Image (spheres, rainbow, N blue to C red):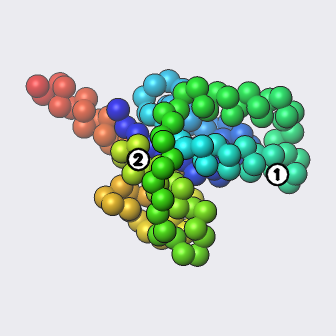
Amino acid sequence: MIKVVLDANQFVSALLKQTSNSSLIIDLVHSGDVRLLVSEKIITEIDRVIRYPKVKKIHRRSDSNLDAFIIKIVRVAQMVPGTLKLRVIEEDPTDDKYLECAIEGGADFIISGDKHLKNLWSFREIPIVSPAEFLKRIKTLRLSALAEKNNG
């Protein structure tokens, strides 16, 4: 199963627009096609970011609805220990938590629109891709697997 780490903004995007690429990825997580990796630090950031006043003004969800959103993420995700400490992204050290989670959980992809992460392109051979690029790659992987199955 493909394991992914999503940055907090992907969850915001999914809340704001149900048809966004981020929302489609979260749908893949809920359907069991993709395994979501999180750490306590990532969950804390998601919870904080989705409650920013300017974000709440757009999505207009209640605090109890946001609590349920976080609980749902925790239920479907694989929690990593969160013990690894890295110092990689000097411009924004708070983004290191995504790299730490990816390494601890054996991620196949880090999905982000954050320039500090995307500028790395990959980290320890884990590609860092946009949501659109991830969906394109997973479609290609599925087609390849189907072709192999049909030829095998």
Q: Residue at x 48, y 59 (%)?
A: 85
The residue to which callout 1 is attached is 52
Q: Is residue 85 above or below residue 8?
A: below
Q: Is residue 120 above or below residue 129?
A: below
Q: Residue at x 31, y 58 (%)?
A: 125
User: As drawn, is 54 to the left or to the right of 112?
Assistant: right
* Circle nearer the viewer, 1 or 2: 2
At label 2, counting other C-alpha atoms closer than 10 Å, the crowd grade (few under 14, some 14-19, many 20 or more) is some
The reply to whether residue 112 is in sight is: no
Q: Residue at x 60, y 70 (%)?
A: 92
Find the residue positioned furthest to the left: 152
The reply to whether residue 50 is in sight is: yes
The residue to which callout 2 is attached is 104
Dot 1 amino acid type: Tyr
Q: CA distance from mark 1 to mark 2?
A: 29 Å
Q: Residue 23: image x %, image y %?
A: 61, 38
Disc 1 secondary structure class: loop
Q: Residue 35: image x %, image y %?
A: 44, 34
User: As drawn, is 19 to the left or to the right of 104?
Assistant: right
Disc 2 secondary structure class: helix
Q: Residue 130: image x %, image y %?
A: 50, 55
The front one of 134 and 124 is 124
Dot 2 amino acid type: Glu
Disc sitting over residue 150 in the figure: none
Q: Are marks 1 and 2 in contact (CB under 8 Å)?
A: no
Find the residue positioned furthest to the front: 83
Q: Residue at x 68, y 50 (%)?
A: 45
Q: Residue 9: image x %, image y %?
A: 65, 52
Q: Quadrant of residue 59?
A: top right
